[in-house]
């Protein structure tokens, strides 16, 4: 089955700096890659997703890039703010499966 | 419009007991997936229900079973509870399939503690 690896496990940045989280996947049939943000004690919330027919997608301060050849995708957060502090999970979904395989998460801390 | 809801929010059980968790999907959604999230880990897929049938299943033993009702709500049942079943159980719903995958929206979860 699909295996998703995520790095780093923890990330601290100064407010206003950028943060980058990287994920790799193993199943070349995966074609949907969402990112979720989970604050302490809260539900995972979708922040952005990308499909395999697109190499990059941006939504305000958040962007995701996908390299299908290398089987990796990354989350980029620019101009970080303290409220961006949370655990971020990447996920991959194989074509026709409609279920998600998650990475182990990255705890992002934005220092004011 | 209510999002995905789950009940109960917290539950304490002892080893060997059985538990039932409930999920109501977001309005307009017909597919429900269940995930187990151990402390400090990413969610792991248990199974998915569509049209009242289990459509896909992850690598979980038969002690984990489920059901989907005609109104699309769902239950997760776990029999013969083990200490290792202690986790946050998340339900996610998604709209009718128009593409290979649809966005999954998560509920707040049920935190199960097995003593």
Image (cartoon, coloured by chain):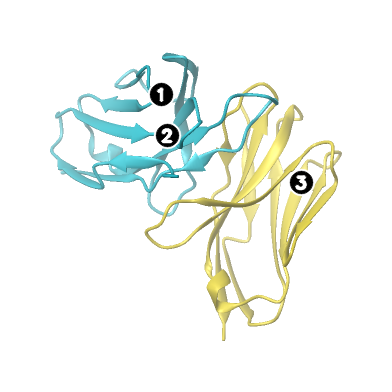
Chain colours: A yellow, B cyan
The C terminus of chain A sits in image quarter: bottom right
Residue indicated by mark 3: A72
**Residue at point 66%, 75% (across, down):** A80
Query: Which element carries disc 1, helix, strand or loop?
Result: loop
Q: Which mark is residue B11?
A: none
In the rendered image, the vertical position of residue A54 relative to residue A93, given as above or below: below
Check if mark 2's residue and mark 1's residue have beta carbons within 8 Å. Answer: yes
Could you say which is closer to the camera, residue A91 or residue B92? B92
Query: For the residues marked 2 and 3, what is the alpha-carbon distance in whole angstroms?
Result: 31 Å
**Chain letter of disc 2?**
B
**Foreground: disc 1 or disc 3:** 1
> Are the residues under marks 2 and 1 on the same chain?
yes
Residue annotated with mark 2 = B25
Task: Tell me the element at label 2.
Answer: loop
Alpha carbon distance from label 2 to label 1: 7 Å
* Left or right of B23, for residue B54: right
x, y percentage for residue A35? 63, 50
Same chain, marks 1 and 3? Answer: no
Q: Tell me how far mark 1 sits from mark 3, CA to CA.
A: 35 Å
Q: Marks 2 and 3: which is nearer the front?
A: 2
């Amino acid at each position: 089955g699909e295996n998703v690896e995520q790095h780093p496990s923890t990330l601290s940045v100064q407010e206003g700096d950028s943060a980058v989280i990287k994920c790799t996947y193993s199943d070349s049939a995966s074609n949907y890659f969402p990112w979720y943000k989970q604050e302490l004690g809260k539900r995972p919330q979708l922040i952005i997703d990308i499909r395999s027919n697109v190499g990059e997608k941006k939504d305000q301060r958040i962007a995701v890039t996908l390299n299908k050849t290398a089987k990796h995708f990354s989350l980029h957060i620019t101009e970080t703010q303290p409220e961006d502090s949370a655990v971020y999970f990447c996920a991959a979904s194989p074509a026709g499966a409609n279920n998600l395989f998650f990475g182990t998460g990255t705890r992002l801390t934005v220092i004011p | 419009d209510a999002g995905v809801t789950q009940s109960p929010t917290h539950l304490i059980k002892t080893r060997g007991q059985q538990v039932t968790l409930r999920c109501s999907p977001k309005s307009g959604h017909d597919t429900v997936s269940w995930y187990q999230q151990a402390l400090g880990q990413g969610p792991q897929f248990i199974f998915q229900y569509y049209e009242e049938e289990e459509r896909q299943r992850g690598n979980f033993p038969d002690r984990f079973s489920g059901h989907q009702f005609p109104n699309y709500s769902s239950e997760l049942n776990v029999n013969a509870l083990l200490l290792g079943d202690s986790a946050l159980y998340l339900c996610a719903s998604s709209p009718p399939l128009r593409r290979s995958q649809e966005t999954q929206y998560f509920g707040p979860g049920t935190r199960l503690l097995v003593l």
